[in-house]
Image (tube, grey):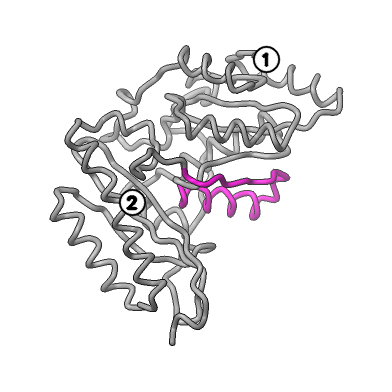
């Protein structure tokens, strides 16, 4: 596996692959890789001859009070995992390579509407940082396919809107959330959990499952379902930012005619902010 740190090196290898006629998949990450990331790499191999994985902790998507400086950076361990997974190239640029000049003067990409709700409400500017770095990576790699995890459901929606609106010729593939045996969604931030918090953390997924089950049994009182879930999480010691039922494709508030939903949540447990979601399709007869 090749490891490069500059855009010039990256583009040199991409050009040779293109000349040879191969197609390319990109898996963008912030590193500290786990089995969920490796599943993305494996799926990327099913889609393309060459797989590029980026490891870059993006400062633009962290607010001043978030964990940018302490975010786990484990590049050598990541490299070993990627070699085992068969990645063709690891792109690990320093911040100054991605953002030359003054950070506050960097051109940013905004996806209106989707970026200011849910996680965007609690993390202002986060999705502008995500959209900016993802578009930069798309311009650098020019992949045929890019693979993302559905755990970051709103992020995936933002990226899909971005490539639609800006006519970026990349096929976006979302991969189902990879979970621990007890249901907890795999995340690099799970290591912030203490042992007792780790034991409590799967409650978030179970609570979302209970909301989905209630919907499958015909409940449409979404606000009450959300309130019940919030109360349950708080009673267990979590500090939820939100639990919400939204239309799957748009993340708009649902109407009586909608049938495809995403139930999403974000909650603090100790120092870790957990996010999760479940998609659900409801048959029309469930209203009876």
Magenta stretch in the rendered image: 152-177
Q: Height in image: 37 above or below 236? A: above
* Label 2 sits on residue: 205
- Residue at figure coordinates x 50%, y 32% from the top left: 37
**In magenta stretch: residue 162:** yes
Disc 2 is placed on an element classified as helix
Q: Can you name the residue that lies furthest to the bottom here?
A: 288
Q: Nearer the viewer, mark 1 or mark 2?
A: 2
Badge number at residue 190:
none
Residue 49 location (% of width, % of height): 76, 29
Residue 174 location (% of width, % of height): 57, 47
Q: Height in image: 2 above or below 205? A: above
> Hey, which quadrant is residue 268 in on the image?
top left
Q: Can you name the residue that lies furthest to the right here?
A: 20
Q: Height in image: 95 above or below 126? A: above
* Label 1 sits on residue: 9
For the residues labelled 1 and 2, the Cα–Cα distance comes to: 42 Å
Disc 1 is placed on an element classified as helix
User: Quarter of the image containing the N terminus?
Assistant: top right
User: Quarter of the image containing the C terminus?
Assistant: bottom left
Residue sitting nearer the eye, 229 or 170: 229
Horizontally, residue 99 falls left or right of residue 202, namely right
**In magenta stretch: residue 256:** no
């Amino acid at each position: 596996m090749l490891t490069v740190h500059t855009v010039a090196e990256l583009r040199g290898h991409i050009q040779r692959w293109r000349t040879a006629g191969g197609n390319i998949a990109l898996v963008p990450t912030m590193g500290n890789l786990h089995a969920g990331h490796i599943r993305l790499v494996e799926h990327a191999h099913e889609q393309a001859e060459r797989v590029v994985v980026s490891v870059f902790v993006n400062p633009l998507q962290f607010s001043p009070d978030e964990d940018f400086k302490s975010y786990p950076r484990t590049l050598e361990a990541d490299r070993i995992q990627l070699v085992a997974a068969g990645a063709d190239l690891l792109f690990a640029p320093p911040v100054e390579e991605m953002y030359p000049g003054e950070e506050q003067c960097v051109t940013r990409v905004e996806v209106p509407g989707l970026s200011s709700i849910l996680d965007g409400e609690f993390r202002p500017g986060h999705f502008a940082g995500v959209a900016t770095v993802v578009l930069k990576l798309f311009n650098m790699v020019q992949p045929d396919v890019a693979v993302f995890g559905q755990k970051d459901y709103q992020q995936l929606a933002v990226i899909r809107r971005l490539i639609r609106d800006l006519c970026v010729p990349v096929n976006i593939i979302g991969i189902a959330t990879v979970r621990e045996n007890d249901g907890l969604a795999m995340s690099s931030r799970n290591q912030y959990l203490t042992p007792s918090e780790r034991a409590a953390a799967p409650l978030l997924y179970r609570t979302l499952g209970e909301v989905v089950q209630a919907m499958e049994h015909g409940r449409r009182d979404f606000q009450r379902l959300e309130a019940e879930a919030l109360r349950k999480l708080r009673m267990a010691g979590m500090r939820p930012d939100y639990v919400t039922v939204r239309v799957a494709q748009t993340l708009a508030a649902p109407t009586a005619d909608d049938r495809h939903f995403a139930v999403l949540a974000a909650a603090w447990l100790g120092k870790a902010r957990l996010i999760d979601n479940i998609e659900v399709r409801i048959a029309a007869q469930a209203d009876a």
